[in-house]
Amino acid sequence: GAVVSQHPSWVICKSGTSVKIECRSLDFQATTMFWYRQFPKQSLMLMATSNEGSKATYEQGVEKDKFLINHASLTLSTLTVTSAHPEDSSFYICSGRSEGPDTQYFGPGTRLTVL
Amino acid sequence: QKEVEQNSGPLSVPEGAIASLNCTYSDRGSQSFFWYRQYSGKSPELIMFIYSNGDKEDGRFTAQLNKASQYVSLLIRDSQPSDSATYLCAVLLPGNQFYFGTGTSLTVIP
């Protein structure tokens, strides 16, 4: 299957700081990438869909000014959590949409802890 | 009504048995169907996808699709403790949107 990487895999930061998470499709071009958040023992929650070269589409209830998404190339999307607070602590997972087959491949996730 | 529904479980089966995971979807126009496995603390990984009615086999895994009943299932033969995970069903809708179920937790008892 296609490979998606995320960096960093684990980050701890102080409240009020910003954190950037990178998502890369390593062996395919992803015109669409998705960002999810998952709290312990809960299901995946889609945060936003990003298409290369255009603005991301955010799900209802997700603050676009707090979670900045950039999809500047066909292999890279970034999520920046601005002014992070403890309630933003979660497991953030990206995925890239491939064309053959038309499905999503997930990155390994980034565990964010805000102190 | 949710687009994709799964029984959250937990489902427990003894080692060596067949585990049967079920998923229903609401949009008859859904085109493609996927099963992902997610171990605790890890991200989902794609196990299988199926587009056509009937069965699709890959090793110990068999996906079954019945579009008339809007039902897709995953069978795991000869279940192993390493199969213990949460299994997510996903559907691709005609509008190019993916929907994930909330997942079924499977425990294989040695």
Image (tube, helix red, strand yellow):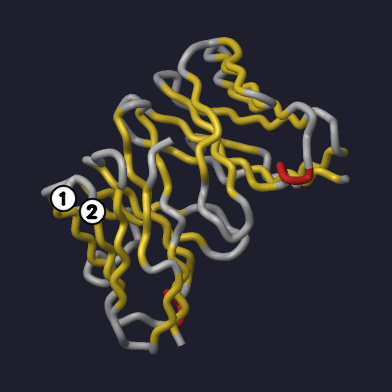
User: What type is the residue that disc 2 sits on?
Assistant: Leu
Residue at left 45%, top 82%? A86
Near-viewer residue (A20 or A61): A20
Q: Residues within 10 Å of mark 2 (few under 14, many from 20)?
A: many
Tell me where residue B39 appears, x and y as whole percent: 62, 52
Residue at left 57%, top 17%? B65
Near-viewer residue (A23 or B8): A23
Q: Residues within 10 Å of mark 1 (few under 14, many from 20)?
A: some
Marking on residue A73: 1
User: What type is the residue that disc 1 sits on?
Assistant: Ser
Residue at left 31%, top 76%? A19
Q: In the drawing, does residue B56 fall left or right of residue A68?
A: right
Secondary structure under the numbered disc 1 in the rendered image? strand
Q: CA distance from mark 2 to mark 1?
A: 5 Å
Q: In the drawing, does residue B37 fall left or right of residue A9?
A: right
Query: Looking at the image, is B88 positioned above or below residue B52?
Result: below
Marking on residue A102: none
Tell me where residue B104 appears, x and y as whole percent: 66, 43
Quarter assignment of residue B17: top right
User: Both on one chain, marks 2 and 1?
Assistant: yes
Residue at image mark 2 = A76
Secondary structure under the numbered disc 2 in the rendered image? strand
Residue at left 28%, top 55%? A58
The disc numbered 1 marks a residue on which chain? A
Classify the position of the N terminus of chain A by image quarter. Answer: top left
Tell me where residue B83 appears, x and y as whole percent: 71, 42
- Dots 2, 1 in contact, CB < 8 A: yes
